[in-house]
Image: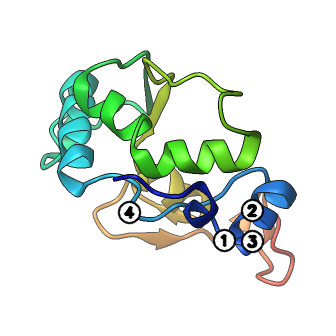
Amino acid sequence: MGLEPARALSATTIHSFITDGFARIDDAFPRETAEEARAILWRDTGCDPHDRSTWTRPVVRLGQYGQAPFREAANAPLLHAAFDQLVGEGRWLPPGTLGTFPSAFPRPRIRAMRAGISTSASAPRIRTSCNGAPISSAAGAPC
């Protein structure tokens, strides 16, 4: 790709990195690479991305991926140019693997309970009291 380091990140993006500790870099690598990596991660979770009934754990942690799509993503020319721009050319090492991928799954029952909706009956019910005291929507504190 041969990007000039000065063009990898704007001054605004560099400032964001310095103040926030991260920078978003859109289109850093091809969509196909992301799709390949995502397929590997889904396979390793043991879950089916199209069947929510297989999403039985709230979080699945997967780690140390060095397969081709992960290496390609982490070593994309745009990212290398950004690394050079942020820390200096030759002052960092290209990654061979990527670390932990915590995969969090939605938990509708937990969200419903926090919102005061009972999921145990056939029809949802809104909780109107907490330990015998009425719930005030203004209070905003969960029971």
- C-alpha gap between disc 4 and disc 1: 15 Å
CA neighbours of label 3 inside 10 A, class few (<14), some (14 to 19), many (20+): few
- C-alpha gap between disc 1 and disc 2: 6 Å
Name the residue: 50% across, 47% down.
79
| The one of 75 and 88 positioned closer to us in this rendering | 88
Is the C-beta separation of discs 3 and 4 under 8 Å? Answer: no
Q: Amino acid at mark 1?
A: Ser
Q: Which residue is mark 3?
A: 11
Is the C-beta separation of discs 3 and 1 under 8 Å? Answer: yes
Is the C-beta separation of discs 3 and 2 under 8 Å? Answer: yes
Q: Which residue is mark 4?
A: 27
Q: Position of residue 20 (x, y in %)?
A: 80, 58
Q: Amino acid at mark 2?
A: Ile
| 42 relative to 104 in the view: left or right | left
Q: Position of residue 91 (x, y in %)?
A: 71, 28
| The one of 60 and 76 positioned closer to us in this rendering | 76
> What is the number of the mark on residue 10?
1
Is the C-beta separation of discs 1 and 2 under 8 Å? Answer: yes
Q: Position of residue 110 (x, y in %)?
A: 51, 50
Give the secondary structure at mark 4: loop
Q: Amino acid at mark 3?
A: Ala
Q: Which residue is mark 2?
A: 14
Name the residue: 52% across, 42% down.
80
| 70 relative to 129 in the view: left or right | left
In which quarter of the view is residue 73 placed?
Answer: top left
Give the secondary structure at mark 3: helix
- C-alpha gap between disc 3 and disc 2: 5 Å
- Give the colouring mode of the picture: rainbow
Name the residue: 31% across, 35% down.
72
